[in-house]
Image (tube, grey):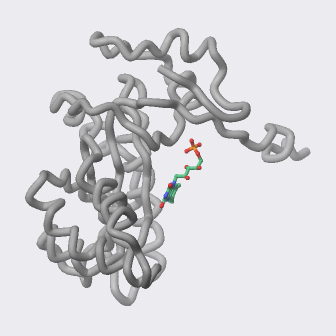
Amino acid sequence: MKSSGQGGACPMVWASMSLSEEHPMNSTQETLISRRSIFSFRDQPVERTLLEDAFEAARHAPCHKQTHPWKFYLMGEQTRLLLIPGVDKIVRQKNSEATPDLIERARQKILESPELIAVTSRKSPGNAFTEEEDYAATVCALHNLVLSLWSRGVGAQWSTGAITRDPVVYEALGISEHEERVIGFIRVGYPEEVPRREKKALEEIRFYLP
Ligand SMILES: Cc1cc2nc3c(=O)[nH]c(=O)nc-3n(C[C@H](O)[C@H](O)[C@H](O)COP(=O)(O)O)c2cc1C
């Protein structure tokens, strides 16, 4: 696995994070610290058992009042193809002189991701606080899923690009905008490259008060 950029995961963590066929479990702390968003994936599907383990981890996320507001839609080829008219429209709206090459690249982000998951959170019209708590719980579930995959050598990237909010997504998933909100897509696959990211120093974010 290649690694790029500045700062980020320590090599010791990566030494124990082999992406071998054995899908080794690493320690929780290593998983949390070494996780990075992955933007380029190997052309290799993710085993269904690993996906199922990740959905199982998501299912156990905390949520207030046991609302379990999350849903995960793993989009196959047919469903992804339904998104393409929306992708084309968004690219042309952003750039009226979009070249066929630019449009093709936007399409491939949807079509070439080894796995693509839409994550939704339950809406609560008229109850903004419940909806906010439910959104928070869905993010916990989403991150449980991401971390479960990462602990097995599988990468993910959360995307909130315009396509994730387009009506075409609700049509493709067969869901109602009044009942569920798509909070993003998760691109999932074996990493081609693991970026490095600078994070804030502990001293900047943690304060022990008397
Ligand atoms: C709510 C949320 C939305 C995101 N949306 C996008 C996105 O639309 N496009 C993208 O390239 N990355 C997106 N990301 C990934 C971030 O770019 C990434 O988390 C950030 O660069 C930090 O890197 P790390 O995840 O490796 O720590 C999103 C992350 C979060 C938490």
User: Residue 69, can we see it?
Assistant: no
Residue 104, position in %: x, y?
Answer: 31, 61
Q: What's the residue at 13%, 61% (across, down)?
A: 79
Going by the picture, which residue comes out furthest to the left? 78
Q: What's the residue at 50%, 42% (across, down)?
A: 37
Q: What's the residue at 35%, 75% (across, down)?
A: 165
Indicate whether 61 appears above or below 184: above
Residue 93, position in %: x, y?
Answer: 40, 84
Q: In the depicted view, which residue is nearer to us: 44 or 129? A: 44
Residue 150, position in %: x, y?
Answer: 41, 30
In the rendered image, the quadrant that contains the C terminus is top right
Say left or right for 179 vs 145. left
Indicate whether 183 appears above or below 177: above
Say left or right for 143 vs 82. right
Going by the picture, which residue comes out furthest to the right? 210
Residue 115, position in %: x, y?
Answer: 25, 44
Indicate whether 102 appears above or below 19: below
- Marks counted in the figure total 0
Q: What's the residue at 47%, 72% (across, down)?
A: 132
Q: Quadrant of residue 188?
A: top left
Going by the picture, which residue comes out furthest to the bottom? 126
User: Residue 160, can we see it?
Assistant: yes
Q: Quadrant of residue 202?
A: top right
Q: In the depicted view, which residue is nearer to us: 149 or 193? A: 193
